[in-house]
Image (cartoon, grey):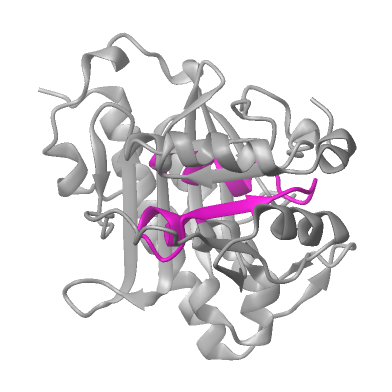
Amino acid sequence: MSSPLMLRLLSASVVAANRAGRVIREVLKSGELSVVDKGGNDPQTEADRKAQRCILSTLSTRFPEINLHGEETLEPSEEDQQLTEMGESGDVLKEACPQIYDGLRERDFIVWVDPLDGTSEFTQGFIEHVTVLIGIAVGGKAVAGVIHQPFVSAPDNTMGRTIWGLVGLGVRGANLITNPPTAGTLRVVVTRSHYTEAVEKTVKAINPTEYLKEGGCGNKVLMVLEGTAEAYIFPSRGTKRWDTCAGDGIVRAAGGVFTDIHGNDILYDCAKDKAANRTGLLVTMDTELHKNIISKIPQSVKDEFEN
């Protein structure tokens, strides 16, 4: 008996992300990054291009009617077929799919792909910040995600760690928070490479006990998910739907909160040219903390990034 479509899509996304991670490591080892400047401090490397070909070819071959949005704009290539992954994730397919996903068709899904999140860090040697992101949305809302860390060891000491989650099922592969943070502790993670005046004003207003500057949206989401930080905030237009959809789905699957800086859900049923998250983002694992941080964001910052 065939597994439900949701689990098959999630399974294919996991194996595609794993293969993309291997591709990224191979490109780095070769030393031929072939960096292209897309403008606005937004580089693209051969690893970005190959990883996206791997993921999009895998998903479009196996699910031809799903809506796929990848960060990079690439022409079809003979390399696409070579990078197509036809395996399955037994860890995903062994799960019981929540009934809320019964009856979905391929065209009901929107998948947002960032083949290499943290490209600036990748080119600068901060490879532990790099992630592969595949987010799955239904009805405009993030419901599942895959985050792969190519340069972090898996539990079996092989290179490459994969975290995935599905709303209604939970999260697998992550070291989820089991104990609440020490009373009075508020560690906030912010951007490493886009530290603007709005970010600085917001951090000062929140007044955390510590703030951490890190690269990569996926990396920062995992820090909150696993308790290295209590919140990730980015009052800026710098992220896109392909940066956030995977983390959004995983955080929600774990019971956390992922919104813009006004507390509104981010919707994913838009075209690629409308992919900018224009009202920033805030990620926490606690609803009350989330509300408290939003209340402290300066009104001048909120007005700058209007609903």
* 64 relative position to 293: left or right: left
Q: Nearer the viewer, residue 198 or 114?
A: 198
Judge whether residue 148 is colored magenta.
no
Q: Is residue 60 visible?
A: no
Give the residue displayed 24% in from the left and 78% down from the top: 158
* 107 relative position to 302: left or right: left
Residue 48 image offset from top left, x and y in percent: 63, 64
Q: Within the image, what quadrant is residue 207 found in?
A: bottom right
Image: 202 above or below 66: below
Give the residue displayed 83% in from the left and 43% down from the top: 301
Residue 234 image offset from top left, x and y in percent: 69, 51
Q: Which residues are magenta?
A: 221-250
Judge whether residue 223 is colored magenta.
yes
Q: Quadrant of the C terminus?
A: top right
Residue 243 image offset from top left, x and y in percent: 61, 49
Give the residue displayed 32% in from the left and 40% down from the top: 254
Residue 164 image offset from top left, x and y in percent: 33, 47
Image: 197 above or below 151: above
* 180 relative position to 209: left or right: left
Q: Quadrant of the N terminus?
A: top left
Q: Within the image, what quadrant is residue 78 found in?
A: bottom right
Q: Nearer the viewer, residue 195 or 64?
A: 195
Q: Nearer the viewer, residue 286 or 171?
A: 286
